[in-house]
Image (spheres, rainbow, N blue to C red):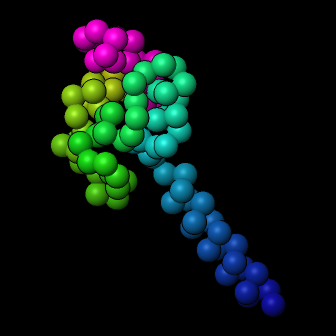
Amino acid sequence: MRVSRMAGVAVATVFLGTMAGPALATPPLLAQAKQKGYPAQNCQYCHVSKMPKKDTFTPDDLNDRGKFLMAEQAKTKASAVDIDALKAYPGGKEQK
């Protein structure tokens, strides 16, 4: 019984560890963009593909807006993308 409990704890730890890894983009980021009034409709707001995959992500998978957000994240040395950085994205309201 004790071995199976330890195995369960180990599996849960590995699962949570992989889920808590650094995410470049997540559905909550899309929701935040919509909530703040940006015209985000799907992942292609920042990505080239409709359904980007975290395990195969490369910077080439980003469109200009996504590359801008990654550059802003690097400038501020933030651990995650900040949707508020879109305020500084060049172009009019329709480009934000």
Q: Looking at the image, which residue is at 79% across and 86% down?
A: 2
Examine the rendering and report whether any part of residue 29 can be seen.
yes
Q: Which residues are magenta?
A: 77-96
In this rendering, position of residue 6 left or right of residue 64? right
Q: Residue furthest bottom?
A: 1
Image quadrant assignment for residue 7: bottom right
Residue 78 visible in this rendered orientation of the protein: no
Rendered image quadrant of residue 15: bottom right
The question of residue 79 being in magenta is answered with yes
Asked where in the image residue 64 lies, by quadrant, the reply is top left
Of residue 86 and residue 45, the one placed in the foreground of this image is 45
Depth check, front residue: 90 or 73? 90
Residue 48 place in picture, x, y as percent: 23, 42
Asked whether residue 38 is drawn in magenta, I would say: no
- Name the residue at 28% across, 57% down: 56
Give the farthest residue toward the right.
1
Q: Is residue 26 left or right of residue 56?
A: right
Against 6, is 55 above or below?
above
Q: Position of residue 25 (x, y in %)?
A: 41, 41
Indicate the position of residue 78 as horizontal and vertical percent values.
44, 28
Quadrant (top left, top right, bottom left, bottom right) of the C terminus: top left
When the figure is inspected, residue 58 is found, relative to residue 73, above or below; the finding is: below
Q: Where is residue 71? Give x, y as percent.
A: 28, 26
Q: Residue at x 27, y 27 (%)?
A: 65
Q: Nearer the viewer, residue 89 or 72?
A: 89
Q: Quadrant of the N terminus?
A: bottom right
Residue drawn 34% across the image and 52% down it? 51
Count of labels in the image: 0
